[in-house]
Amino acid sequence: MSRHVICLLLTGCLLAGCSLQASAQMIQAGVGQQNFGDSFFENIGPGGWTQSSSRSMSMSSASLTTLNGYPGSMFSGTVRPFVTGLTPSVGSFVPGNDEIRQFGLRQQQATLESIAQRKSEARNEKMSVHLQRALRAEQSGNLKMARANFRIALANADPITRQQIMARMAQHGWRP
């Protein structure tokens, strides 16, 4: 892994750590680098006299912008021009880059789905805990505690459970 990518990742981690109080803020980190090269080659041999030259210019700027607390992804690759005749032909995409980009997008989507699944599981767990507390409080006669826990459970419930909680609250004359 290059120094620049490590620097970028460290910068991103520092920015993420410093922005805990600023929720829903965007985090952006970037690093740039340029390389230039030029070479010339001549050969005299049994097959004849050959010449070759090569010039290269490489510019990269790794940059990542994402929401605080959400994953981001980065692509690192090389695009090289190639000559098939007298006229250079520079492609905008090296064969395979689209597949790599699609793989990255699939990975990002899988990560976002995983985060959504964990959030859903956490909400269901919270709803279950408060619903059980509400039922215990209701059985023991502590209706004030039961009502408070029913309301918290209601805020985290799926539609079917929400209807059941609302019906239970209506039995006591409570509004959600």
Image (tube, rainbow, N blue to C red):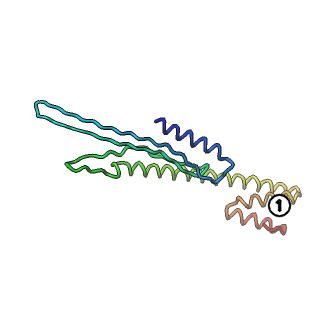
Q: Quadrant of residue 76?
A: top left
Residue drawn at the location 44% of the way across and 41% of the way down: 33
Above-or-below relation of 85 to 3: below
As drawn, is 1 to the left or to the right of 129?
Answer: left
Residue drawn at the location 53% of the way across and 48% of the way down: 72
Above-or-below relation of 114 to 168: above
As drawn, is 67 to the left or to the right of 146?
Answer: left
As drawn, is 120 to the left or to the right of 173?
Answer: left
The residue to which callout 1 is attached is 147
- Residue 9, x across and y down, in percent: 54, 40
Residue drawn at the location 24% of the way across and 39% of the way down: 53
- Secondary structure of the residue carrying numbered label 1: helix
The residue under label 1 is which amino acid type?
Arg
Quarter that holds the C terminus? bottom right
Q: Residue lying at the far right in this picture: please name it.
A: 141
Q: Pointer 1: residues within 10 angstroms few (<14), some, or many (20+)?
A: many
- Residue 50, x across and y down, in percent: 16, 36
